[in-house]
Amino acid sequence: MILTPPASDQNLTSLQKLEKRSLQIRRRLRRYPAAKSFFTRSSLLAHDLRQRSSQILAGAGLTGALLFSPPSLTALPASPIAQTDEISMSFKQILAKSLQSLISHTPSSLTSEQATQIEAEIEKTTGLKVKAVLENQQLNHQVGYIGYEQHLQRYPGDTLADHDEEQIAGIAPGLGAWGYFASDRSRFTTTDYLREKYYSVAQTLYLPNWESDFSDLRDWYKYRKILVVNPANGQAVVTVLGDSGPAEWTGKQFGGSPETMKALGLHLGSRKGLVLFLFLDDPDDLIPLGPITSPYNLNINV
């Protein structure tokens, strides 16, 4: 049998009907002392429940709006990682843009005017002091093609398996121009490790006075710090001269370790590219070897 609600109930909402029914039940139960005490203490009576339900539904609606609404790009701050990538990319773009109009896209030696402009731009952008001529020394080229070199033997018995990166490059069968980086494995330091990892190569053997002043020049150029910059993408890396070469017939003026070439973005494809190759003026040895990812502030009291 279907019961039809009283006419007076037909215009009530479902919630109002529920409250009315609840009130009727409470009145009947209040006849019993235990039930009366329970309803007095309880805060979850029907009229309280309605208020709390409204608050819960309102909160759920707000949560749903946040979940299903498209994100506001202006309201949400970028993550620290995104900000770091943004700064790094901007830094590289600025460096590339500042150099591209100043550098010839063919191997060359910089004029004094070009050198002054380029040195100023690099210092302004990176905070690093570089020189085309340092302590009266100058390479035959400051702009030239760099090629992908093999790993160098760092100590007697060194093997390719002991090198932790870019093993695809292989290891040179002979020694670099300066010999081993360490006399034996027990004396192999982190400094030696980084020097081989980020070594560069320049044609010191073709300097006009290389043979006549060999002993002095060899000591001056050995592990001399060099900043290598790829003007096409603004990627730069601090290296040391770890070898002499390449030969003129290769058509290249410089060389770079596998990790150096990777830092320049030149480790794939032809593994060759035009770079800017300048002495790093760092007499106190403050600048670490490796890729440059942000400007340096050297005006800090340590």
Image (tube, rainbow, N blue to C red):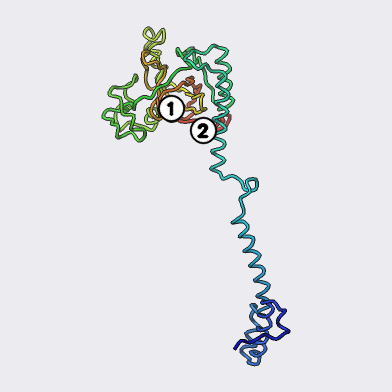
Which residue appears at 35% of the width and 35% of the height? 164
Which residue appears at 28% of the width and 30% of the height? 158
> Eyeballing the image, is 150 above or below 82?
above
Which structural element holds mark 2?
Answer: loop
Please state which of residues 8 and 192 is positioned toward the viewer in this rendering. Answer: 8
Tell me the crowding category of disc 1: few under 14, some 14 to 19, or many 20 or more residues within 10 angstroms, Cα based: many
Q: Which mark is residue 157?
A: none
Tell me the crowding category of disc 2: few under 14, some 14 to 19, or many 20 or more residues within 10 angstroms, Cα based: some
Which structural element holds mark 1?
Answer: loop
Q: Which image quadrant is residue 294 in?
A: top right
Lateral position of residue 226 relative to residue 117, left or right:
left
User: Extreme left residue here?
Assistant: 157
> Eyeballing the image, is 267 above or below 205?
below
Lateral position of residue 236 relative to residue 73, left or right:
left
The quadrant the N terminus occupies is: bottom right
Q: Disc 2 marks which amino acid?
A: Thr
Label 1 belongs to which residue? 266
User: Extreme front residue here?
Assistant: 1
Location of residue 34 in the rendering, given as x and y in whole percent from the top left corner? 61, 89
Label 2 belongs to which residue? 293
Please state which of residues 69 and 265 is positioned toward the viewer in this rendering. Answer: 69
Please state which of residues 75 and 156 is positioned toward the viewer in this rendering. Answer: 75
Which residue appears at 45% of the width and 17% of the height? 144
The quadrant the C terminus occupies is: top right
